[in-house]
Amino acid sequence: MSPITKVAETPLVAPTVWNTKNLGLRLASDFVSGACAATLVAPLITVIDKSIMQNASGQATLKNSLKTSLKTFLLRPHSLIFSKPFGLICMLYGGTYLTANALDTLTSTVQNKPATLVTSGTAKFAASSTANIGLCLFKDQAFARLFGPGGPPRPVPLPSYALFTLRDCMTIFASFNLPPLLGPIISRNMNQEIQKSLSGQTIAQFLAPATIQIFSTPMHLLGLDLYNRGKEVSWGDRWTIVKKNWGVSAVARMCRIVPAFGIGGVVNGKVRKRLISKLE
């Protein structure tokens, strides 16, 4: 067989095609949309997180802490916006949104899909969870020291880190993976007139993260109690404290999660879609 015949019979392998059009601008859009959403929701989340920490440590009741912080924000907003807690919250949610956005952009690039692609698989859960958990653990240990029971700073125990990690995995799954799955189901059971102004995806984006707080709040409270009261406390005593604060803390965490992954998630998604649609 001649060399020419061999070449002719060799199967052609289709070259890999990536969607790299305006890739730099698409990644910049990922950053801008994440930063906009994080900045929008950070003031309220900062106030709520501070109140939960102070209530758990005994520095102040949830009600008094919320009242003081909201009054300060209304009368002297710059004192909150330029504070360390505000910066930590912006870092946490801006980093989480950016990771989820960038994964969608990289997936659309490698798979040669439209730039507006939004994924909901294992890769997004893993990437978003890793970013959120790492940033949230850093934020939580800083908040625990800022608003803890006082005294010299001490290390956050490993069981607290484990509980915070499980808490955040549940929240991330409910915020990024469940809405794309629940959205179509909710839409199929909605009135056509309602769907004109409110999509099933939007309802799922608010409902899933808020509902999961009922189950993740005890982990949060137990992790804080392990830091605040140390080792010399019985598990029965810890459970009493968790039960006492479960209801009010769950409501407070719902109020912070709805802005964080409800409003923030919707704003991030809509801003990203609008920016990237102009680049396709």
Image (tube, rainbow, N blue to C red):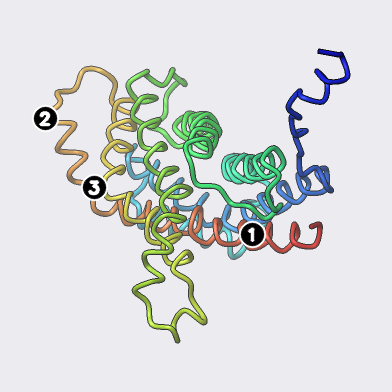
Residue at image x 31%, y 42%? 216
* Disc on the earlier residue, 1 or 2: 1
Q: CA distance from mark 2 to mark 3?
A: 15 Å
Identify the amino acid type marked 3: Trp
Q: Looking at the image, is mark 1 or mark 3 nearer the viewer? A: 3
Mark 1, secondary structure of its residue: loop
Label 2, on which residue? 236
* Residue 246 vertical placement versus 180 (above, below): above
Q: Is residue 200 visible?
A: yes
* Disc on the earlier residue, 1 or 3: 1
Instruction: Report whether 237 appears left or right of 138.
Output: left
Task: Please state, as top left, top right, bottom left or bottom right, where the N terminus lies in the image.
Answer: top right
Give the residue furthest to the bottom.
193
Mark 3, secondary structure of its residue: helix
Other residues around mark 1 within 10 Å, as few (<14) / some (14–19) / many (≥20): few
Label 3, on which residue? 246
Query: Picture coordinates of residue 89 (x, y %)?
Result: 57, 44
Mark 2 vs 3: CB contact within 8 A: no
* Residue 79 vertical placement versus 131 (above, below): below
Q: CA distance from mark 1 to mark 2?
A: 43 Å
Query: Picture coordinates of residue 266 (x, y %)?
Result: 56, 61
Label 1, on which residue? 76
* Disc on the earlier residue, 2 or 3: 2
Q: How many marks?
A: 3
Residue at image x 30%, y 51%? 250
